[in-house]
Structures are given as structure tokens and as C-alpha cells.
Amino acid sequence: MESQLQQIREEGLTEIAAASSLAALDSVRVKMLGRAGSISLLSQSMKDVAKENRPRFGKLLNELREEVTSSLEKRVAALNAETDQVLLSSLDFTLPGTCPELGAVHPLTRLLNRAVEVFRRMGFVLAEGPDIETEWHCFDALNTPADHPARNEQDTFYLPDGRLLRTHTSTIQTRVMESQIPPIRVIGPGAAYRRDEVDATHLAQFNQLEGLYVAPDVTLADLKGTVSFFFCELFGSGTELRFRPHFFPFTEPSYEIDIRTQALGNRWMELAGCGMVDPAVFEAVSARRGDRAYDPELISGFAFGFGLDRLAMNLTSIPDIRMLVENDMRFLSQFR
Ligand code: PHE
């Protein structure tokens, strides 16, 4: 029995030492320690050993099992180290690495961040609305009924269920007033859509920033002060503003705002629409809400909206609006 044990030991250790791959090593393990392996068979023959010899034989058998197990482990480690060595020697650590492409903040986002920061300082909070809108939020509530000519000017994309892609971010006004009570002081940035022919100055999707302030006794002076402060913060204190009378269905009186500043080439540029919220808008919102929180006799407000794309283009001398959406790295990497 003992000589058999000795033989298994020697043969096993020799095979382990000779195994040149993990697979070969595993078959040695199965051959010795597997269920029908030589060591397992040997332990089954324990019953044939004389009773007085059993403890000694058992001890030898355990020692053999431990010795084989540990030399298997050592050989696995040695084989792994050899493989690593081969891999490492084929690597050249002196080769230059590949540098990950660094991203940059898009010129539009950069402008928006600056705008939001200025309005925050005046107590405005961010508001949002969906791009897919109902006709009511986009037109009817904003004093633009179905037969109003202003709807033609803002012709848009309709979905089969009658909803539409919003033509302006003024929908955010209606959404905020529908769900919150005055005082309201919000800015709402977002995409707007119109069925425009795409060219160097037009996209079918562009970006606007809407503002709305509703409280008791809000006046035109508040509107002028707020908008002037904003543009002076953005472009410097030398910035001049011109409020030109205009028409929007949802504000009365209404203005277009022209700006002249060094940063925009020192020529007058039409940048924004604005006005005092039309009482008809407050009435439409009140009818929807079923309360008098927006009673035009008790509160007033102003709203403004401007396009971000054209502003960003002028600030950074971008000649073609399409560059803002083409994701061309040669263009974008200039803004790092
Ligand atoms: N919604 C208008 C537009 O898209 C801009 C505007 C907003 C005008 C708020 C007045 C008040 O042209």
C-alpha cells in the first residue's frame, strides 16, 4: 500500500512539473484528485488496510493530497507568470499613447449658461415645457385663435393627433401659469420649430429663451430694466437698446428689441420680442385653471423671447447656422 502511495506521488509530481499548459495541468488534477482519480481510489481502498495501520495510512494519504494540491497551485502560478512574461515582453512602453478626444462646451450651451446665470441673479428660475405641444398651449391660450393670421407666419409641423412641434418657447409661459400662481419669475430655454427653408440663416429647429414675470403692478419700466440689465451684463455696459413698437398677439403693447454693441460689430441687430402680457392671455389661463389667480385687474406681467442661435453666431463669428448642428469636429474643436 505504502509503495503504491509512493509511486502515485512520484508519478504525479513529475507530471505536474512537466505540464506545459493550464489545460494539461488540469487533466493531471483530474487524473489524481478527480472522483475516479488515483488518490481518490486509494482512499477508497482504506477499508482493506489492517485496522491498526489505518491511522498512519490515513495520515499519509492526507499528506499526499495536500502535497499534490499545493504543487498544482504552484505550477498554475508559474504557468501564469510565464504567460504574463511573454505578453509583457511584446509590449513597448516607450510608444506614444493615444490621447482621448477632449470635449468642449458647445457655443450655444455656453451662451445659454451665461444667460441663465444673469437671470438667476435677478431671481428668475428655470422652467421647462415639452417640444411636442397642444395647439392650446402654443396658440389659443396665447390669444392666437385658429383663424389668426399670426398662425401662418409660425407654420409648423403637426402630428396626426393634432399636436404640434412648438413654434416658440412662449408655450412655457402658458404651462407655468397653468400650474403655478403669481408671483411668477421664470426663464424657459428650449428648442422651437418652424417650417422654414433651411439655409445659412435658417433651420427648421432653433433655440429660444423665454422670460415671464407676473405679479401685482409689474410695468413696462420693469420690462425695460430687466432686459437692459441682461444685455448689458452679457455684452458690457456700453450696450445700447432700442425698443421698437411691434405686434405679438399675446402681448400689448409689444416691442422688438434692437441692440447695438461692440461685441456684435457695433451695428443695430434685432434680437428679441417682448411686451406686457395681454389680458386675453390671463383670461384664457384663468378659464383653464377655473380660478382668479390671474385676474388681469389685479396682476400684470411682462414676457420676452429671443433666439439663441443667431446671438451665438454673432458673438463667435459663425457664418452659417448649420454649423451649429453638423457636429463637425473641425468646427467644434475651436471652442475648447
Ligand atoms: N414668441 C415670440 C416669437 O417667437 C417672441 C416673444 C416672446 C414675444 C414673448 C413677446 C413676448 O417670435
Image (cartoon, helix red, strand yellow):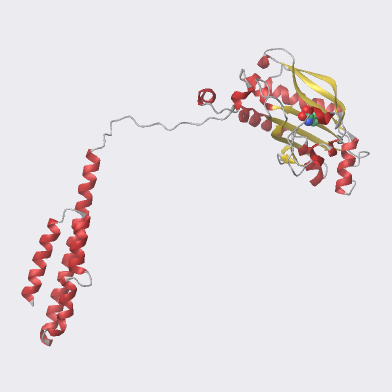
Q: Quadrant of ligand 1?
A: top right
Name the residue: 85% across, 26% down: 221
**Above/below status of 27 relative to 183:** below
Q: Is residue 304 something one can see in this rendering? A: no
Residue 123 place in picture, x, y as percent:
74, 36
Residue 89 place in picture, x, y as percent:
22, 39
Residue farthest toward the right in the current orientation of the protein: 297
Residue 60 place in picture, x, y as percent:
13, 74
Name the residue: 14% across, 70% down: 64
Query: Which quarter of the rendered picture does the N terminus lie within?
Result: bottom left
Residue farthest toward the front in the current orientation of the protein: 160
Numbered marks: total: 0
Residue 212 place in picture, x, y as percent:
79, 35
**Above/below status of 221 relative to 77:** above
Q: Quadrant of residue 26?
A: bottom left
Q: Is residue 181 something one can see in this rendering? A: yes
Q: Quadrant of residue 170?
A: top right
Residue farthest toward the left in the current orientation of the protein: 3
Q: Quadrant of residue 165?
A: top right
**Camera-side residue of 163 and 207:** 163
**Camera-side residue of 330 and 159:** 159
**Above/below status of 131 relative to 195:** below
Residue farthest toward the bottom in the current orientation of the protein: 51
Name the residue: 67% across, 16% down: 264
Name the residue: 19% across, 59% down: 25
